[in-house]
Image (cartoon, rainbow, N blue to C red):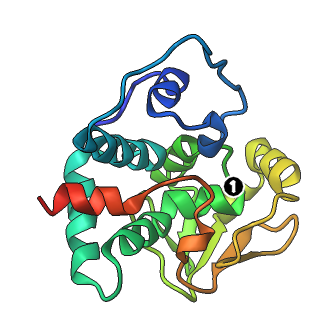
Amino acid sequence: MAKNTQPILKRCKTLGISPAVLGVSKETKRNPKQSRRKQSEYAMQLNEKQKVKFIYGVLEKQFRKYYEKAAKMEGKAGENLLSLLETRLDNVVFRLGFAKTRREARQLTSHGHFTVNGQKVDIASYRVKPGDVIAVREKSRSSAKFKALVEELGATSCPKWLEKEKDSFEGKVIAMPQRDDIDYEVAEHLIVELYSK
């Protein structure tokens, strides 16, 4: 399986995103003297695509498949793409507070620590649907890691499309994510323009 091994903070600085979006608390310092010349239209489109791919930890081939699926769905392709990425199991685990970062959520998912509707799922790209219940497996609940995570991140609020009780080991998808649920800046129309060339 291919994986991205680039340094997170360096990549965040290059793409112009805050490391907090990825769950990393360390903030990078901006160099005020550093000036870049104006980007071309293609460079802006490519930058937006790379930013979204990096945030969700998706490589090009899989990202393209998400775009093709989003383009066939009803509604705006850009919003559909973000919705598909948000409903990945590893992202939902991160949003519910069972992991500090999306990378950690991906690893915990692939190690089989979660169930969807009572069935063990170890595929990070598994798409959840409204009504699905995501829970930490019974075996994993007793581990110190999950107890600490639930205590530490249990108080954090979930997006409105997810439902989780405080200090619980399970959450529920109550709706599909909407465009206003995305908590980072992204111009998805640039990604659509890039792929529609």
Residue found at x 62% / y 34%:
19
Q: Nearer the viewer, residue 120 or 18?
A: 18
Q: How many marks?
A: 1
Q: Nearer the viewer, residue 162 or 106?
A: 162
Asked if residue 116 is positioned above or below residue 10 in the image, the reply reads: below
Residue found at x 72% / y 56%:
97
Q: Residue furthest front?
A: 38
The reply to whether residue 115 is visible in this rendering is yes
Residue 186, percent from left and from top: 48, 54
Residue 116, percent from left and from top: 53, 75
Residue 27, percent from left and from top: 70, 26
- Residues packed near mark 1 inside 10 Å, few (<14), some (14 to 19) or many (20 plus): many
Q: Residue furthest left?
A: 197
Instruction: Locate residue 81: give its quadrant.
Output: bottom left
Residue 167, percent from left and from top: 87, 64
Instruction: Locate residue 82: give its quadrant.
Output: bottom left
The answer to whether 168 appears left or right of 113 in the picture is right
Residue identifier under label 1: 98
Residue found at x 61% / y 37%:
18
Amino acid on which disc 1 is placed: Phe
Q: Secondary structure at mark 1?
A: loop
Q: Quick one: quadrant of the N terminus? A: top left
The reply to whether residue 123 is visible in this rendering is no
